[in-house]
Protein backbone atom coordinates (compact mmCIF):
# COMPACT_ATOMS: atom_id res chain seq x y z
CA UNK A 1 0.00 0.00 0.00
CA UNK A 2 2.94 2.39 0.15
CA UNK A 3 2.38 5.59 2.09
CA UNK A 4 -0.88 6.45 0.43
CA UNK A 5 -3.41 4.79 2.70
CA UNK A 6 -3.89 7.87 4.84
CA UNK A 7 -7.37 8.86 5.91
CA UNK A 8 -7.38 12.29 4.29
CA UNK A 9 -10.66 13.01 2.56
CA UNK A 10 -11.56 15.36 -0.27
CA UNK A 11 -8.04 16.39 -1.11
CA UNK A 12 -8.42 17.40 -4.71
CA UNK A 13 -4.78 17.97 -5.48
CA UNK A 14 -2.18 16.29 -3.29
CA UNK A 15 1.01 17.11 -5.21
CA UNK A 16 3.44 14.95 -3.23
CA UNK A 17 1.09 11.96 -3.51
CA UNK A 18 0.96 12.56 -7.24
CA UNK A 19 4.72 12.67 -7.63
CA UNK A 20 5.24 9.54 -5.55
CA UNK A 21 2.49 7.76 -7.47
CA UNK A 22 4.07 8.89 -10.76
CA UNK A 23 7.31 7.32 -9.59
CA UNK A 24 5.53 3.99 -8.95
CA UNK A 25 3.93 4.18 -12.42
CA UNK A 26 7.20 4.90 -14.21
CA UNK A 27 8.82 1.97 -12.39
CA UNK A 28 6.06 -0.45 -13.43
CA UNK A 29 3.85 -0.29 -10.33
CA UNK A 30 0.02 -0.14 -10.14
CA UNK A 31 -2.34 1.92 -7.98
CA UNK A 32 -5.80 3.37 -7.42
CA UNK A 33 -6.52 6.73 -9.08
CA UNK A 34 -9.48 9.12 -8.96
CA UNK A 35 -11.29 10.18 -12.12
CA UNK A 36 -14.53 12.14 -12.54
CA UNK A 37 -16.38 8.90 -13.41
CA UNK A 38 -15.14 6.11 -11.12
CA UNK A 39 -11.78 5.17 -9.55
CA UNK A 40 -9.34 3.43 -11.88
CA UNK A 41 -6.56 0.92 -11.37
CA UNK A 42 -3.59 2.55 -13.09
CA UNK A 43 -0.43 1.32 -14.82
CA UNK A 44 1.91 2.61 -17.55
CA UNK A 45 -0.10 1.75 -20.71
CA UNK A 46 3.14 1.29 -22.68
CA UNK A 47 4.67 -1.24 -20.26
CA UNK A 48 3.36 -4.82 -20.85
CA UNK A 49 4.59 -6.14 -17.47
CA UNK A 50 2.87 -3.32 -15.59
CA UNK A 51 -0.36 -3.79 -17.55
CA UNK A 52 -0.31 -7.52 -16.79
CA UNK A 53 -0.39 -6.65 -13.06
CA UNK A 54 -3.71 -4.82 -13.59
CA UNK A 55 -5.34 -7.90 -15.10
CA UNK A 56 -3.98 -10.08 -12.30
CA UNK A 57 -5.06 -7.76 -9.46
CA UNK A 58 -8.60 -7.48 -10.90
CA UNK A 59 -8.96 -11.10 -11.98
CA UNK A 60 -9.86 -9.64 -15.38
CA UNK A 61 -9.71 -11.89 -18.45
CA UNK A 62 -6.91 -10.94 -20.86
CA UNK A 63 -9.46 -10.68 -23.70
CA UNK A 64 -10.95 -7.52 -22.15
CA UNK A 65 -9.06 -4.42 -23.42
CA UNK A 66 -8.24 -1.40 -21.23
CA UNK A 67 -8.86 2.33 -21.66
CA UNK A 68 -5.72 4.46 -22.14
CA UNK A 69 -5.89 7.82 -20.33
CA UNK A 70 -4.02 10.85 -21.69
CA UNK A 71 -3.48 14.40 -20.43
CA UNK A 72 -3.33 16.39 -23.68
CA UNK A 73 -3.83 16.06 -27.43
CA UNK A 74 -0.15 15.63 -28.11
CA UNK A 75 -0.11 12.48 -25.97
CA UNK A 76 -3.48 11.38 -27.38
CA UNK A 77 -2.12 11.45 -30.94
CA UNK A 78 0.84 9.31 -29.83
CA UNK A 79 -1.43 6.46 -28.70
CA UNK A 80 -4.16 6.55 -31.37
CA UNK A 81 -4.75 7.68 -34.95
CA UNK A 82 -7.04 10.69 -34.70
CA UNK A 83 -9.57 11.22 -37.48
CA UNK A 84 -11.11 14.68 -38.06
CA UNK A 85 -14.32 13.48 -36.31
CA UNK A 86 -12.29 12.29 -33.31
CA UNK A 87 -10.55 15.67 -33.15
CA UNK A 88 -13.97 17.31 -33.19
CA UNK A 89 -15.32 15.21 -30.28
CA UNK A 90 -12.09 15.70 -28.32
CA UNK A 91 -12.35 19.47 -28.75
CA UNK A 92 -15.95 19.39 -27.54
CA UNK A 93 -15.91 16.84 -24.70
CA UNK A 94 -12.33 16.50 -23.41
CA UNK A 95 -11.22 16.57 -20.71
CA UNK A 96 -14.34 14.65 -19.70
CA UNK A 97 -16.22 11.34 -19.51
CA UNK A 98 -16.00 10.36 -23.20
CA UNK A 99 -13.94 7.38 -24.42
CA UNK A 100 -13.26 6.98 -28.15
CA UNK A 101 -12.20 3.72 -29.79
CA UNK A 102 -9.70 4.50 -32.58
CA UNK A 103 -6.90 2.73 -34.50
CA UNK A 104 -3.96 2.22 -32.16
CA UNK A 105 -0.33 3.19 -32.75
CA UNK A 106 2.68 0.89 -32.15
CA UNK A 107 3.36 2.68 -28.83
CA UNK A 108 0.54 0.69 -27.24
CA UNK A 109 1.39 -2.99 -26.64
CA UNK A 110 -1.01 -5.82 -27.51
CA UNK A 111 -1.77 -6.73 -23.90
CA UNK A 112 -3.32 -3.28 -23.29
CA UNK A 113 -5.78 -3.67 -26.18
CA UNK A 114 -6.23 -7.46 -25.80
CA UNK A 115 -4.67 -7.92 -29.22
CA UNK A 116 -7.10 -5.58 -30.99
CA UNK A 117 -5.83 -3.07 -33.53
CA UNK A 118 -7.96 -0.40 -31.89
CA UNK A 119 -7.44 1.40 -28.59
CA UNK A 120 -9.96 3.07 -26.27
CA UNK A 121 -8.69 6.58 -25.37
CA UNK A 122 -9.94 9.17 -22.95
CA UNK A 123 -8.75 12.42 -21.37
CA UNK A 124 -10.20 12.50 -17.84
CA UNK A 125 -10.96 15.81 -16.12
CA UNK A 126 -9.97 15.01 -12.52
CA UNK A 127 -6.99 17.29 -11.74
CA UNK A 128 -5.13 14.64 -9.70
CA UNK A 129 -5.40 12.13 -12.54
CA UNK A 130 -4.32 14.70 -15.14
CA UNK A 131 -1.38 15.65 -12.92
CA UNK A 132 -0.39 11.99 -12.53
CA UNK A 133 -0.43 11.38 -16.30
CA UNK A 134 1.50 14.58 -16.97
CA UNK A 135 4.14 13.49 -14.44
CA UNK A 136 4.41 9.92 -15.77
CA UNK A 137 3.01 8.13 -18.85
CA UNK A 138 -0.19 7.43 -20.76
CA UNK A 139 -2.12 5.41 -18.16
CA UNK A 140 -4.10 2.23 -18.75
CA UNK A 141 -6.87 2.08 -16.16
CA UNK A 142 -9.94 -0.10 -15.88
CA UNK A 143 -12.35 0.58 -13.04
CA UNK A 144 -10.61 -0.43 -9.79
CA UNK A 145 -12.98 -3.24 -8.80
CA UNK A 146 -12.58 -7.02 -8.88
CA UNK A 147 -13.85 -8.13 -12.34
CA UNK A 148 -17.65 -8.23 -12.49
CA UNK A 149 -18.33 -6.20 -9.30
CA UNK A 150 -19.67 -2.63 -9.10
CA UNK A 151 -17.13 0.16 -9.72
CA UNK A 152 -15.54 2.14 -6.84
CA UNK A 153 -16.54 5.80 -6.42
CA UNK A 154 -14.26 6.73 -3.50
CA UNK A 155 -10.75 5.84 -2.36
CA UNK A 156 -12.03 3.69 0.52
CA UNK A 157 -13.84 1.36 -1.95
CA UNK A 158 -10.50 0.77 -3.68
CA UNK A 159 -8.56 0.20 -0.47
CA UNK A 160 -11.12 -2.24 0.89
CA UNK A 161 -11.16 -4.37 -2.26
CA UNK A 162 -7.65 -4.18 -3.72
CA UNK A 163 -5.60 -2.61 -0.92
CA UNK A 164 -3.25 -5.55 -0.45
CA UNK A 165 -2.52 -5.95 -4.14
CA UNK A 166 -1.55 -2.44 -5.21
CA UNK A 167 1.25 0.07 -4.62
CA UNK A 168 -0.75 3.23 -3.84
CA UNK A 169 -4.17 4.89 -3.76
CA UNK A 170 -4.53 8.60 -4.55
CA UNK A 171 -7.50 9.97 -2.61
CA UNK A 172 -9.24 12.50 -4.85
CA UNK A 173 -12.57 12.53 -3.02
CA UNK A 174 -15.89 11.20 -4.30
CA UNK A 175 -16.30 10.83 -8.06
CA UNK A 176 -18.45 13.57 -9.58
CA UNK A 177 -20.27 11.38 -12.18
CA UNK A 178 -20.42 7.99 -10.45
CA UNK A 179 -20.89 5.94 -13.64
CA UNK A 180 -18.23 4.99 -16.20
CA UNK A 181 -17.49 7.05 -19.32
CA UNK A 182 -19.57 6.98 -22.49
CA UNK A 183 -17.74 4.80 -25.06
CA UNK A 184 -18.05 5.44 -28.81
CA UNK A 185 -16.64 3.20 -31.53
CA UNK A 186 -15.21 5.71 -34.01
CA UNK A 187 -13.86 3.28 -36.63
CA UNK A 188 -17.25 1.93 -37.80
CA UNK A 189 -19.83 3.45 -40.09
CA UNK A 190 -22.14 4.58 -38.62
CA UNK A 191 -20.24 5.22 -35.40
CA UNK A 192 -21.57 3.19 -32.46
CA UNK A 193 -22.36 3.80 -28.84
CA UNK A 194 -20.62 0.88 -27.06
CA UNK A 195 -21.52 1.94 -23.50
CA UNK A 196 -23.92 4.68 -22.35
CA UNK A 197 -22.38 7.05 -19.80
CA UNK A 198 -22.50 10.61 -18.46
CA UNK A 199 -22.49 12.19 -21.95
CA UNK A 200 -25.79 11.30 -23.66
CA UNK A 201 -25.67 9.88 -27.22
CA UNK A 202 -27.80 12.76 -28.58
CA UNK A 203 -25.06 15.22 -27.61
CA UNK A 204 -22.43 13.16 -29.39
CA UNK A 205 -24.57 12.81 -32.53
CA UNK A 206 -25.18 16.56 -32.48
CA UNK A 207 -21.47 17.34 -32.14
CA UNK A 208 -20.65 14.91 -34.96
CA UNK A 209 -23.46 16.15 -37.17
CA UNK A 210 -24.27 12.52 -38.02
CA UNK A 211 -26.34 9.59 -36.75
CA UNK A 212 -24.92 7.39 -34.00
CA UNK A 213 -25.91 3.72 -33.80
CA UNK A 214 -27.17 3.57 -30.22
CA UNK A 215 -28.27 -0.06 -30.07
CA UNK A 216 -25.53 -2.16 -31.62
CA UNK A 217 -26.20 -5.89 -31.37
CA UNK A 218 -23.98 -7.29 -28.67
CA UNK A 219 -22.26 -10.48 -29.73
CA UNK A 220 -21.75 -12.17 -26.37
CA UNK A 221 -19.01 -14.45 -27.71
CA UNK A 222 -16.97 -11.56 -29.13
CA UNK A 223 -18.17 -8.51 -27.26
CA UNK A 224 -16.84 -5.22 -28.54
CA UNK A 225 -16.84 -4.07 -24.94
CA UNK A 226 -16.99 -6.91 -22.41
CA UNK A 227 -18.50 -4.37 -20.02
CA UNK A 228 -21.48 -4.89 -22.32
CA UNK A 229 -21.79 -8.51 -21.17
CA UNK A 230 -25.26 -8.99 -19.74
CA UNK A 231 -24.03 -10.00 -16.31
CA UNK A 232 -21.59 -7.39 -15.02
CA UNK A 233 -21.50 -4.85 -12.21
CA UNK A 234 -23.17 -7.53 -10.06
CA UNK A 235 -23.75 -7.22 -6.34
CA UNK A 236 -23.88 -10.46 -4.35
CA UNK A 237 -27.37 -9.72 -3.04
CA UNK A 238 -30.36 -10.54 -5.20
CA UNK A 239 -31.30 -7.36 -7.10
CA UNK A 240 -34.70 -6.88 -8.76
CA UNK A 241 -35.82 -3.81 -10.72
CA UNK A 242 -39.28 -2.26 -10.51
CA UNK A 243 -41.19 0.48 -12.36
CA UNK A 244 -43.99 0.83 -9.83
CA UNK A 245 -43.66 0.39 -6.05
CA UNK A 246 -46.75 -1.87 -6.19
CA UNK A 247 -44.45 -4.52 -7.72
CA UNK A 248 -42.62 -4.90 -4.39
CA UNK A 249 -44.22 -7.91 -2.64
CA UNK A 250 -46.16 -7.34 0.61
CA UNK A 251 -44.02 -8.12 3.64
CA UNK A 252 -40.76 -7.67 1.66
CA UNK A 253 -37.97 -7.86 4.25
CA UNK A 254 -35.07 -6.57 2.13
CA UNK A 255 -34.07 -3.04 1.09
CA UNK A 256 -35.73 -0.81 -1.51
CA UNK A 257 -33.96 1.90 -3.54
CA UNK A 258 -35.98 4.79 -4.99
CA UNK A 259 -34.81 7.52 -7.36
CA UNK A 260 -36.33 10.24 -5.16
CA UNK A 261 -37.13 10.43 -1.45
CA UNK A 262 -40.46 8.66 -0.75
CA UNK A 263 -43.13 10.80 0.96
CA UNK A 264 -42.90 8.78 4.18
CA UNK A 265 -39.79 6.61 3.94
CA UNK A 266 -39.71 3.37 5.94
CA UNK A 267 -36.57 2.06 7.64
CA UNK A 268 -35.62 -0.19 4.74
CA UNK A 269 -36.25 2.47 2.05
CA UNK A 270 -33.35 4.41 0.50
CA UNK A 271 -33.16 7.03 -2.25
CA UNK A 272 -30.54 8.07 -4.78
CA UNK A 273 -31.47 11.76 -4.85
CA UNK A 274 -33.68 13.97 -2.67
CA UNK A 275 -35.78 15.12 -5.65
CA UNK A 276 -35.01 12.47 -8.27
CA UNK A 277 -32.23 14.38 -10.05
CA UNK A 278 -30.65 11.80 -12.39
CA UNK A 279 -27.08 13.17 -12.28
CA UNK A 280 -27.18 12.99 -8.48
CA UNK A 281 -28.72 9.50 -8.65
CA UNK A 282 -25.85 8.32 -10.89
CA UNK A 283 -23.31 9.79 -8.50
CA UNK A 284 -24.76 7.85 -5.54
CA UNK A 285 -25.74 4.62 -7.34
CA UNK A 286 -22.71 2.33 -6.86
CA UNK A 287 -21.96 3.50 -3.29
CA UNK A 288 -25.54 2.77 -2.18
CA UNK A 289 -25.64 -0.63 -3.90
CA UNK A 290 -22.29 -1.48 -2.29
CA UNK A 291 -23.51 -0.40 1.17
CA UNK A 292 -26.75 -2.39 0.93
CA UNK A 293 -24.92 -5.37 -0.58
CA UNK A 294 -22.90 -5.59 2.65
CA UNK A 295 -26.20 -6.31 4.50
CA UNK A 296 -26.75 -9.32 2.23
CA UNK A 297 -30.53 -8.77 1.94
CA UNK A 298 -32.57 -8.76 -1.28
CA UNK A 299 -32.73 -5.37 -3.00
CA UNK A 300 -35.54 -3.85 -5.06
CA UNK A 301 -34.44 -0.85 -7.14
CA UNK A 302 -36.55 1.61 -9.15
CA UNK A 303 -35.85 1.87 -12.90
CA UNK A 304 -34.85 5.36 -14.10
CA UNK A 305 -36.36 7.12 -17.13
CA UNK A 306 -34.41 6.29 -20.30
CA UNK A 307 -33.13 9.76 -21.11
CA UNK A 308 -29.82 11.56 -20.57
CA UNK A 309 -27.71 9.89 -17.89
CA UNK A 310 -30.78 7.75 -17.03
CA UNK A 311 -29.68 5.53 -19.95
CA UNK A 312 -26.38 4.81 -18.22
CA UNK A 313 -28.07 4.14 -14.86
CA UNK A 314 -30.56 1.79 -16.52
CA UNK A 315 -27.73 0.02 -18.37
CA UNK A 316 -25.74 -0.65 -15.18
CA UNK A 317 -28.85 -1.70 -13.22
CA UNK A 318 -29.89 -4.04 -16.04
CA UNK A 319 -26.53 -5.80 -15.84
CA UNK A 320 -26.55 -5.86 -12.03
CA UNK A 321 -30.07 -7.34 -11.90
CA UNK A 322 -30.23 -10.95 -10.77
CA UNK A 323 -31.14 -13.17 -13.70
CA UNK A 324 -33.93 -15.57 -12.78
O1 LIG B 1 -14.99 5.94 -16.84
C1 LIG B 1 -14.29 5.03 -17.26
O2 LIG B 1 -14.25 4.71 -18.45
C2 LIG B 1 -13.42 4.29 -16.23
C3 LIG B 1 -12.38 5.24 -15.68
C4 LIG B 1 -11.40 4.57 -14.74
O3 LIG B 1 -11.73 5.88 -16.74
N1 LIG B 1 -12.82 3.13 -16.80
C5 LIG B 1 -13.53 2.01 -17.13
O4 LIG B 1 -12.74 0.99 -17.62
O5 LIG B 1 -14.73 1.92 -17.00
P1 LIG B 1 -13.26 -0.51 -17.75
O6 LIG B 1 -12.05 -1.30 -18.12
O7 LIG B 1 -13.98 -0.93 -16.53
O8 LIG B 1 -14.23 -0.46 -18.99
C6 LIG B 1 -13.70 -0.20 -20.26
C7 LIG B 1 -14.54 -0.80 -21.32
C8 LIG B 1 -14.55 -2.30 -21.28
O9 LIG B 1 -15.88 -2.75 -21.40
C9 LIG B 1 -13.72 -2.68 -22.51
O10 LIG B 1 -14.11 -3.87 -23.06
C10 LIG B 1 -13.97 -1.50 -23.44
O11 LIG B 1 -13.99 -0.40 -22.58
N2 LIG B 1 -12.87 -1.34 -24.41
C11 LIG B 1 -11.59 -1.05 -24.16
N3 LIG B 1 -10.87 -1.05 -25.30
C12 LIG B 1 -11.71 -1.33 -26.30
C13 LIG B 1 -11.57 -1.47 -27.72
N4 LIG B 1 -10.39 -1.34 -28.32
N5 LIG B 1 -12.68 -1.76 -28.43
C14 LIG B 1 -13.88 -1.90 -27.81
N6 LIG B 1 -14.07 -1.78 -26.48
C15 LIG B 1 -13.01 -1.50 -25.73
MG1 LIG C 1 -15.23 -1.82 -15.24
Image: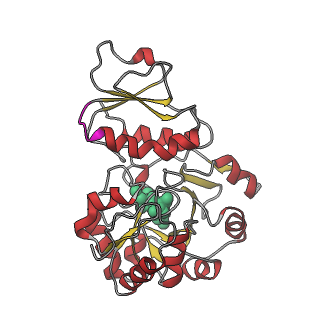
Query: In the picture provided, is 203 more to the left or to the right than 274?
Result: right
132 relative to 100, above or below: below
Q: Position of residue 283 (x, y in %)?
A: 50, 47
305 relative to 143, above or below: above
Image quarter where the C terminus lies is top left
The quadrant holding residue 250 is top left
183 relative to 41, above or below: above
Please name the residue shown 60% across and 62% down the image.
Answer: 96
Q: Nearer the viewer, residue 101 or 91?
A: 91
Query: In the picture provided, is 181 more to the left or to the right than 211?
Result: left
Please name the residue shown 48% across and 19% down the image.
Answer: 244
Q: Residue furthest top?
A: 250
Q: Position of residue 182 (x, y in %)?
A: 56, 54
Q: Residue furthest front?
A: 8
Does the magenta run of residues contain 73? Answer: no
Q: Nearer the viewer, residue 172 or 152?
A: 172
Q: Mark yes or no: residue 106 visible.
A: no
Q: Mark yes or no: residue 141 visible.
A: yes
Please name the residue shown 28% across and 77% down the image.
Answer: 2
Q: Position of residue 279 (x, y in %)?
A: 57, 43
Q: Tell me which segment is drawn in magenta.
A: 293-297
Q: How is the image coloured?
A: secondary structure
Q: Nearer the viewer, residue 184 or 182?
A: 182
Image quarter where the N terminus lies is bottom left
> Taking the image as four quarters, which one is ligand 2 found in?
bottom left
Task: From the image, give the main secondary structure of the stretch colored magenta.
Answer: loop
Q: How many marks?
A: 0
Query: In the picture provided, is 175 more to the left or to the right than 298?
Result: right
Amino acid sequence: MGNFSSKRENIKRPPSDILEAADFIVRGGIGGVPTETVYGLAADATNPDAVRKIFEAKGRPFIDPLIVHVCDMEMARKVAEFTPEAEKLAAEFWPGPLTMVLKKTPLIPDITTAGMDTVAVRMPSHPAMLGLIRASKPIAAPSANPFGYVSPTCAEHVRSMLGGKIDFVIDGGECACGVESTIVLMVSSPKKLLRPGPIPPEEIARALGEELDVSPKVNEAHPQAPGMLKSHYSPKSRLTLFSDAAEIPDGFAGNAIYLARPAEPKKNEYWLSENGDLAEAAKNLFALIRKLDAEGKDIFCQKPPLSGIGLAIADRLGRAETKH
